[in-house]
Amino acid sequence: MATKGHDEVKESLREMTRIFKPKDPKKFVKEYVRKYRIMGGYEEELTSLVEHELGKLDSSVS
């Protein structure tokens, strides 16, 4: 995946995480990858990104 495209995917996923606040990050990423036809192999990286974003949201609420 090209760097520009990769950054766009990450930013899009961050925004969607803020909006939907998924309970299961792994399932959320799996559906995202399938829906937007993202190349395989990035699921773990994207899942950790979602988990990190959810952590930031939880800490800002407390």
Image (cartoon, rainbow, N blue to C red):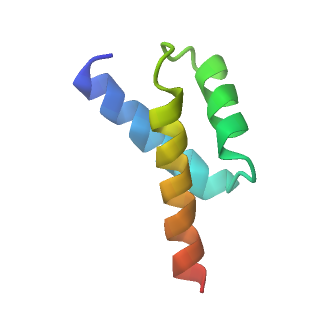
* Closer-to-camera residue (52/31): 52
- Specify the farthest residue to the bottom: 62
Q: How many marks?
A: 0
- Location of the N terminus by quadrant is top left
Q: Residue at x 57, y 60 (%)?
A: 54
Q: Is residue 3 above or below residue 15?
A: above
Left or right position of 18 against 27 = left
Q: Whole-percent x and y of residue 6?
A: 34, 28
Q: Whole-percent x and y of residue 27?
A: 72, 36
Q: Residue at x 56, y 14 (%)?
A: 37
Q: Whole-percent x and y of residue 8?
A: 36, 33
Q: Is residue 25 above or below residue 8?
A: below
Image quarter for residue 26? top right
* Closer-to-camera residue (8/61): 61
Q: Is residue 56 above or below residue 42?
A: below
Q: Residue at x 52, y 79 (%)?
A: 60
Q: Whole-percent x and y of residue 13?
A: 51, 41
Q: Is residue 5 above or below residue 48?
A: above
Left or right position of 61 against 40 = right
